[in-house]
Amino acid sequence: MTNHTIWESLKAKFETFKNWLVRYSKIVLPVILVVCVALTIVIAIQANKRKVEQEETVVAPEENTGEEEAMLEVPEVPLEKDAVPEINELFAVYHKAMVEGDTATMEKLVYYMDATEILRAAETSKYIESYPPLEIYTKAGPKEGTYIAYVYGEIKFYDYDKPVPGMRVYYVCTNEDGELYINEDGEESDNELHYMREIQLQEDVIDLNNKAAEAYNKMMVDDPKLADFLLELKAEIEKNVGEALARAEQSEEPEEGTEEETSEETAEEEPVEVVTKVKTTDVVNIRTSDSETADKLGKAAVGDEFELLEEKGNGWSKVKYDGGEAYIKSDFLEPSETMTASVAEQNGDEEEEPQEQQTEDNNSDSAEVTGTVTVKENVRIRSGASENAEKITTAYKGDKLDVIMKQADGWTKIKYNGKTAYVKSDYVE
């Protein structure tokens, strides 16, 4: 294979990578950083390739077709850190909106976000706890008033105890009013793409890519579970986005009351698998409360079994331990014993006394409500009014849930995806 053929192959692969990056740029910085590692390898190969081609050109210069003369000249200027205060402010506001799930602000700053990307941004924000201070590097862009911005920093997730390093590259432009915005429309001209490719090959950009890759790879080596966490996170986000899109489509269809009521009754009668005991999958601390700073009561070995009292929505499980109660991270537990029960049994209903149950549902402690409730803290949505009932999904802080009834037993009966489900009343308002 000739050098020219290899170069053309690399250019084609780069174009494929660019199109993929535009589509999935909103997932999370650490996931994109995995791509950056691969990109760094490609960059190194390309840099070496250009050197070989330049040496060959001295011997046999290629015919000048005039095409390269039309391309923009790419200046060799160094990366500048925090050189444009307006860009720093742009990304400070943008990342704050990402943490808070403020898609309205994100839409103002990004051109442009389609409906799916808006949903993905909102879902991703539910997992992000914070962004520590960012390092922002820039180079002049291909047009006046444009910049290539490299944003390096760490992202803190709710379910992972350490901040994860990552870096993203942005194309920043200036609108007619002189305001900066992030351009992600995917409509760059050949000249713009040529300019961006050449910038990526400059040594200081390669060094920055290597810095980000080195920090990320070190975390991967130090904690092999990080890769699984990021893959599961991406899958969970995509699942939630898919469900949200499906709900949006269903809301546009005409409702058929009789059919819906029948499906709810059927769902209530379906048997569910209830986890009664769990066992540990790794060595893990046993603590006095659902916090990693709580006092340790002991340490469980792999395979130790516990009676499950409650699986909380915050990632902890309450278990029986030494005649009392204790807490273990749910990620280190798996079911070891289950029992089959109907939803009615989980709710404490008794078929022999329907009239008594009807009266109980209508007393002052179980007021019927209509409308929605807001989730105050992450909580599991379950198929029955029991801490051991089957998990359907997780509702996150700020989510709105359709309410059927607030029950006297501490559970709120809701409608989720057209079926009856339950959440702990303490977690909603």
Image (tube, rainbow, N blue to C red):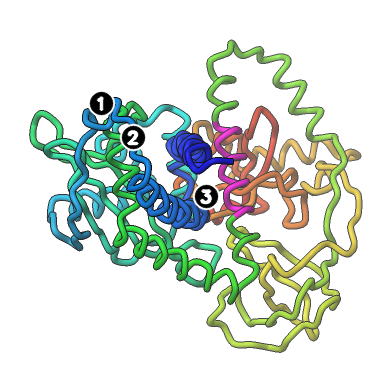
Mark 2 or mark 1, whichever is nearer to me: 1
What is the three-letter code of the residue carrying label 2?
Glu
Report if the CB atoms under discs 2 and 3 are less than 8 Å apart.
no
Compute the Cα span from label 2 to label 3: 28 Å
Percent position of residue 360, x then y: 71, 43
What is the three-letter code of the residue carrying label 3?
Tyr
Residue at image position (61%, 61%) is: 227
* Secondary structure of residue under mark 2: loop
* Secondary structure of residue under mark 1: loop
What is the three-letter code of the residue carrying label 1?
Gly
Compute the Cα span from label 1 to label 3: 58 Å
Magenta region: which residues?
231-244
| The disc label shown at residue 312, or none | none
Q: Which residue is mark 2?
A: 184
Residue in front for this viewpoint, 291 or 235:
235
Tell me the quarter of the picture where residue 324 sits. bottom right
Q: Earlier in the sequence, mark 1 or mark 3?
A: 1
Q: Which residue is mark 1?
A: 66
Residue 202 seen in render:
yes
Percent position of residue 197, x then y: 34, 43
Tell me the quarter of the picture where residue 350 sits. top right
Residue at image position (25%, 47%) is: 148
Q: Earlier in the sequence, mark 2 or mark 1?
A: 1
Q: Which residue is mark 3?
A: 396
Looking at the image, is 421 positioned above or below residue 276? above
Q: Residues within 10 Å of mark 1 (few under 14, many from 20)?
A: few
